[in-house]
Amino acid sequence: MAVVERATPWMGICTILAVDSSSISYQACAVCERPVADGGAAACRCSRPFRRFYRLLISVATADEVLAVVCFDRVARGLVGGPADEFVDLCSVNEESVQGVLSGLEGEPFWMTLTRPRSGAAQHLRVTAMVPLSSAFCPLMELLQ
Ligand SMILES: [Zn+2]
């Protein structure tokens, strides 16, 4: 059965083919995590600073198929090695493009848990857990420091 048709989470080996570097994060309230509305206005009344939350769109290959998956903040932090604001800053301090740094993930194998989105409108499977299979794997930010 294709992964997208499964009612239960799928677990297995996925190799990263590409990470879409055109949009890797969105701004949201640091407290309630509501995304900032169009035009940059707060969508809540927390009156707290915004921060970036990861939303990585990744193409992965299983043994049988190629899938488009989305990786949100909690899981992406482990992959990158720190919060999205720090990652973007660190790339710029090192004069590295985000795209160039993310391309270092291509070809990396992971043990992934993929879960069907709760909302019927969401298009992509969600990565709810990922563990690197290469013993040489190092989070991206550690490579930059
Ligand atoms: Zn808020």
Image (cartoon, rainbow, N blue to C red):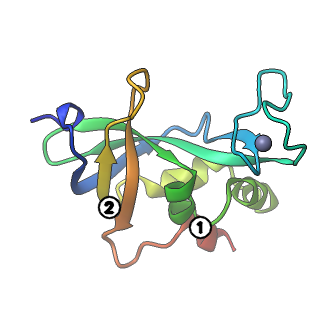
- Left or right of 21? Residue 30 is right
Q: Is residue 142 above or below residue 120?
A: below
Q: Which residue is mark 2?
A: 110
Name the residue furthest front. Answer: 45
Q: Quadrant of the C terminus?
A: bottom right
Q: Is residue 45 above or below residue 105?
A: above
Residue at the image point whose x is 49% and y is 73% from the top = 138
Res 50 quadrant in image: top right
Q: Quadrant of ligand 1?
A: top right
Name the residue furthest right. Answer: 47
- Left or right of 84? Residue 46 is right
Q: Callout 1 environment at 10 Å: few (<14), some (14 to 19), or many (20+)? A: some
Whether residues under marks 2 and 1 lie with C-beta atoms below 8 angstroms apart, the answer is no
Query: Could you tell me residue 143's position as x and y percent?
Result: 60, 71
Residue type at mark 1 is: Gly
Q: Callout 2 environment at 10 Å: few (<14), some (14 to 19), or many (20+)? A: some
Q: Which mark is residue 112?
A: none
Q: Quadrant of the N terminus?
A: top left
Res 68 quadrant in image: top left
Residue at the image point whose x is 56% and y is 42% from the top = 55
Query: Could you tell me residue 28's position as x and y percent?
Result: 73, 41
Query: Could you tell me residue 106's position as x and y percent?
Result: 41, 52
Q: State which tag comes first along the sequence, 2 or 1.
A: 1
Q: Nearer the viewer, residue 120 or 25?
A: 120
Q: CA distance from mark 2 to mark 1?
A: 15 Å
The secondary element bearing badge 1 is classed as loop
Q: Nearer the viewer, residue 64 or 93?
A: 64
Residue at the image point whose x is 57% and y is 60% from the top = 77
Q: Which mark is residue 81?
A: 1
Name the residue furthest bottom. Answer: 135
- Left or right of 31? Residue 69 is left
